[in-house]
Amino acid sequence: MSDEILFAEDTDEKIEWHGKWKVLIVDDEPEVHAVTKLALGDFVFQDRDLEFISAFNGEEARQMFREHDDIAVVLLDVVMETDDAGLKVAEFIRNEMDNHFTRIILRTGQPGQAPERDVIINYDINDYKSKTELTAQKLFSVVIAALRSYRDIIVIEENRQGLEKTISASADLFRIHSLESFIEGIVQQLASLLGGTKDTAYLTSAVAGPKPIEQYNASELYVFTGRGEYQNKKGYRLEDVISGRELISCQQAYANKTMVCEDEYLVVYCNSKTKKGSLLYMSGLPRKLTKIDRNLIEIFSHNVQIAFDNVLLNKDIEDTQREIVERLVDAMEASFGSKNHTQRMIKICEILGRAANLSEQDLKTLCLAVPLHDIGKIRISDNIMLKLGSLDKEEMQEVRNHTEIGYNLLKGSNRPFIKMAALIARDHHEYWNGKGYPRGKSGEGIHIFCRITSLADAFDAMRTKRSYKEAWPLEKVMEVIVAEKGQQFEPKMVELLQENLDEIENIMQSFPNES
């Protein structure tokens, strides 16, 4: 037996590993455990030595696998408490534990009990050795080969898991249509890929921060949003938030369209086909990144930019839709002398919708649709809409017709928010008790968007000055609304308004009625 086991530096690419290689010795002879540990006592592979675990029968071996999910190699005796105890352990490892990573080396002192040919064919093992032929050198060679295989299998598995996470992350990001949610998705998925980061910043010239985009220099990078140290730095220039070596790395990554990876931080260039590229900056990395990590981040960063371009495109479409609606409504409000009514309605409906636990997508649809709730009034005579004082019965009926008029104007569209706007235009005067108009709907038969709009519209009408009335004080408004709880208005919606009254009153002050 050699006094010391040494081997040449492994020529394979260096991979960062931590801890020790776990080797499980399964044998009912204590001397075998002692000799194996002695022979491999100075064994080192890729800067990691061995950690020995012992089991003296099949059940102990099974228990070790239940307790340790990172055993690299098992030196497994065939004949122990039964003639096939070791073979049953091998079956347990592969089938019950579904462990196809651990390298299984069968060792037997009685080859006749388990012929090598039969065992190799019938059992998922990696090597078969007779104890008499396992000299120290051969044991060393067997373990080296087994550890190389285990290492490569683990690398492949990490690649597989990483790619799975990257694909999943990309899919999640492509489902995001909100700029506000975009960075949260990036950070969440990076945490999944890397195990978390301390600070994260997404820097781009393609989107505005606090100022309008026209006021930004398109050749400079600004913090779109961030986490940790950069959480409140939206709209800041790159040079104002990052300095020293990190700033130089960011400039290099952007200029060379590449990744710069250091021990404590990482900068990734996110290439774009429609906009200038962006940078993803991370500091406080949880560990030194491997080549696998860097490859996955490169794939992820490419998909991040595609997703970001997609978010910008959606934002542009939504902004265009919103601007068209707002210009139409502004013209209508100017005619009726009710400036800022729509802005207040959007804000109040958003508050009530969020309090009612609407999804972000539903909130977005509601806020896009609600400005058109009174679109039918464009067909009502100005003599009626601008009349000072009360309306007579016939005039009141003509005003009520604006619900069906608005519905008929909008109902032919296939656009989701226009279809919802048609429904709101028709049903926002329906009552919870079924005594509203135009269809006499009641309770939850009235869409929640319409129930929200109904309460917001009534609150705004009472709290502001109109051509036919002065603004009512808040106390009187709430007295009427509470009295109509369960009659005109949904009870739960009235409670949500009461709970959020201060915020709603702030909206009323921020968007005063201008005639």
Image (cartoon, helix red, strand yellow):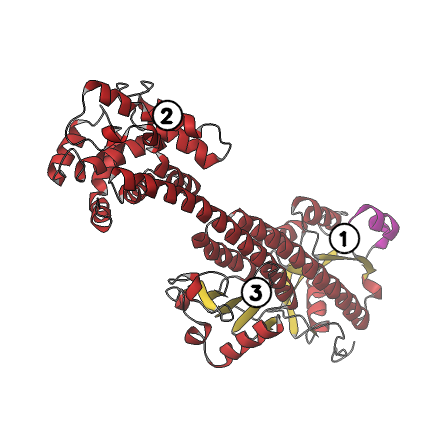
Distance Cα–Cα, label 1 vs label 3: 61 Å
Give the magenta-colored segment's residue range. Answer: 111-125
Along the line of sight, the residue nearer the viewer: 421 or 7? 421
Residue type highlighted by circle 2: Ile
Residue at 37% in and 44% down:
326
Task: Report which residue position mark 3 lands on.
Answer: 277
Characterize the local packing of mark 2: few (<14), some (14-19) or many (20 or more) Cα atoms within 10 angstroms.
many
Tag 2 secondary structure: helix
Residue type highlighted by circle 1: Val
Q: Is residue 294 visible?
A: yes
**Residue contact between numbered discs 1 and 3, judged by CB atoms under 8 Å:** no
Tell me, yes or no, whether the highlighted magenta stretch contains residue 248.
Answer: no
Along the line of sight, the residue nearer the viewer: 80 or 162? 162
Nearest to the eye among marks 1 and 2: give it.
Answer: 2
Residue at 51% in and 57% down:
186
Hey, which quadrant is residue 374 in on the image? top left
Distance Cα–Cα, label 3 vs label 2: 48 Å
Task: Report which residue position mark 1 lands on.
Answer: 78
Residue type highlighted by circle 3: Gly
Provide residue 506's location: percent of width, then percent of height. Answer: 21, 49
Task: Report which residue position mark 2 lands on.
Answer: 405
